[in-house]
Amino acid sequence: MKHAILIMAALATLSAPALADEALAKSKNCMACHAVDKKLVGPAYKDIAAKYAGNAQAAAMLATKIQKGGSGVWGAIPMPANPQVNDADAKKLATWVLGLK
């Protein structure tokens, strides 16, 4: 019984940050164009994580794209700038996206 409680507590701890960052993505309107596991207007977050896996500069590059927008990487539709996202939140969102499997 104690093992089950410890496992449940560990799982709750692991999923809480992921949910918090998904909540941040929703609050910053990111989820209007992106989803975790399927393409909408923009690519799925899991596809982004897979594309940049192992790239040491990916978090900084994605944080910049979140704030300033970009084009040409995922097709013809550009990603607009999101000025409501500050530097700290952009880094948090980029790290969350890159951590998705």
Image: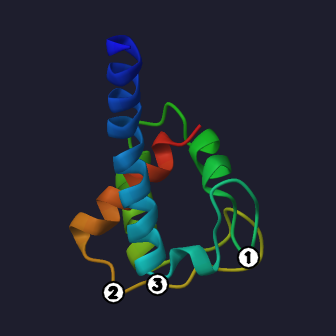
Image spot of residue 77 (x, y percent): 73, 79
- In this picture, is 11 found above or below 33? above
Q: CB under 8 Å between callouts 2 and 3?
A: no
Q: Secondary structure at mark 3?
A: loop
3D distance between C-alphas at marks 2 and 3: 9 Å
Of discs 2 and 3, which sits in the foreground? 2
Amino acid tagged 2? Gln
The residue lying at 59 percent from left, 37 percent from top is: 101
- In this picture, is 87 found above or below 56? below
- In this picture, is 74 found above or below 83? above
Q: Secondary structure at mark 2?
A: loop
Q: Residue furthest left?
A: 88
Amino acid tagged 3? Ala
Res. 8 image quadrant: top left
3D distance between C-alphas at marks 3 and 1: 15 Å
Residue ID for mark 3: 81
The residue lying at 35 percent from left, 23 percent from top is: 5
Amino acid tagged 1? Val
Along the line of sight, the residue nearer the viewer: 20 or 87: 20
Residue ID for mark 2: 84
Figure coloring: rainbow
Q: CB under 8 Å between callouts 3 and 1?
A: no
Along the line of sight, the residue nearer the viewer: 29 or 57: 29
Image spot of residue 65 (x, y percent): 46, 69
The residue lying at 34 percent from left, 28 percent from top is: 10
Q: Is residue 70 visible?
A: no
Q: Give the number of callouts.
A: 3
Q: Is residue 101 visible?
A: yes
Labels 3 and 1: the sequence-earlier one: 1
Q: CB under 8 Å between callouts 1 and 2?
A: no
Residue 41: mark:
1
Quarter of the N terminus within the rendering = top left
